[in-house]
Image (spheres, helix red, strand yellow):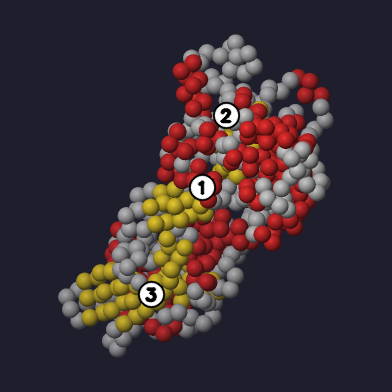
Amino acid sequence: MSAKLGRTLCVALSGLDGRIVDVEAHISSQLPNFSVTGLPDKACGQAPDRVRSAAATSGHPLPPQRITVNLSPASIPKQGTGFDIAIALAVLAAAGVVDARRIAQVVHLGELGLDGRVRGVRGILPAVLAAARAGVAHVVVPPENVAEAQLVDGVTVHCAPTLATLVHWYAVRGGVDPLPVPGPVEADGEEVHRHGDLADVLGQPEARLAVEIAAVGEHHLLMNGPPGVGKTMLAERLVTILPPLSREQALQTHAIRSLTGDEIRASELDLTPPFVAPHHSASMASITGGGSGVVLPGAISRAHCGVLFLDEAGEFKTSVLQQLRQPLESGEVTIARAKQLVRYPARFQLVLATNPCPCGRGWGKGIDCVCSAVELRSYQAKLSGPLIDRVDIQVVVPPVSRAAFGDDDGESSATVLERVMEARGVQQERWSRHGWATNARVPGHALRRAPWRLPGQVTASIDRGLDLGQLTLRGYDRTLRLAWSAADLFGRVSPTAEDVGLAFTLRSQGRAAA
């Protein structure tokens, strides 16, 4: 046995950030043993058993000697079974089965079955993105993960269905010609319309306007009203009037889906903004991210660049709702663990839907309501002042009368999207040189100073609201942002007193009803 050392590459993930790992294998003439060093977790530390069995069933049994594998840098945690292929090839290179030079600069990702099959793993897309940023030219992935790996430009993706296929490719073909990959899977045509159309909503002109302004300026939204009036339909259709994602945004959202194990079947990016609607019984970890062992992204990160919809918001745990406050301001969530600090992006549009009371019948005079004063107070206290103050639009969604049945169908999502795109273009032209994308992201101090400061006669209504304590300073700034969005929607150069008044109304009526 001439070769005693083997080396190849893999990727260790911390959140969406990846780091290239040198997988080094050494075989020595000592008592048989197979160990992995370099802070592997339990799943990664069990790789020797899988690799030994897979190599034997693939026709390349490992020598009965001491095998030591080091994952370098050894100071960062290594998690999951995605290191299996890299460990197997490094050991086989040390054993002289594979030319060590041919695998040294290739990233290998995937789990090994005991029969030698290569199985898919989570996090392939962020791992391949990390490899591309590090200048790696070739990546080998399992068949299930080929589509998402091909979303990354500048990297040649190879498919390894079995360990035997991979060893044969390196030994006979030299690892030069590409391994064949499965053809692209076409997306289902039904997926295009999975969120419906805004024309499906019956009546509710005020709520439709609120949803449109929310889409224009990327504003958070609270809808308060009795059950069955269309709050959920409006929230779902907000996604249909949001502009398509940019390539960078789509890569981020797909990378998060890859980490959570969502199947990515098509080799083309889906530019539709994500829509995430967790159940009100969801835990804090499922909303913000976390878990034992591997820290996975939660609902707020899965909704990154899209919509997070909390239906029956008053039924969520208070602790869960309060955890939303920091991500709403910063656009990311930080999850601290004893050995690592993981950050996930979480810039989403929050949409809350709530009933006026637990029984849902406390509408208008509330004569049919059966809730006690204690129940009502507890229910309304779930949506605390500091959280609601971060929600730009707070509107009432009243019951639909029979008179609305005779109305013509409302505007379609395509028609509304055209106006939203035009208004977004105006914002891009106005704010791009300052580094802001939409009105909702403009700092309040910028809107209160020249050249964007509005005349006193235009802001008179909210100036008075601030003096009377009806608005906090944060609420004042958010109302200004809403006014700019209304002006952009209606084609005005700057907000008028009517735009500011509309923004003040949109911000206050939903909370007052609550």
Q: Quadrant of residue 46?
A: bottom left
- In the rendered structure, which disc, 1 or 3, sits on the residue that comes first in sequence? 3
Q: Are marks 2 and 1 in contact (CB under 8 Å)?
A: no
Amino acid identity at mark 3: Asp
Residue occupied by mark 2: 354
Q: Is residue 327 above or below residue 33?
A: above
Give the distance between the C-alpha atoms of the residues marked 1 and 3, in whole angstroms: 35 Å
| Element assignment for label 3 | strand
In-front residue for pair 20/432: 432
359 displayed left or right of 336? right
Can you give x and y, in whole percent of width and height, for residue 23 in the image? Answer: 36, 74
**Mark number for residue 327?**
1
Residue occupied by mark 3: 22
Q: Is residue 198 above or below residue 133?
A: above
Bin the neighbour count of mark 3 within 10 Å (Cα to Cα): few under 14, some 14-19, many 20 and up.
Answer: many
**Mark number for residue 290?**
none
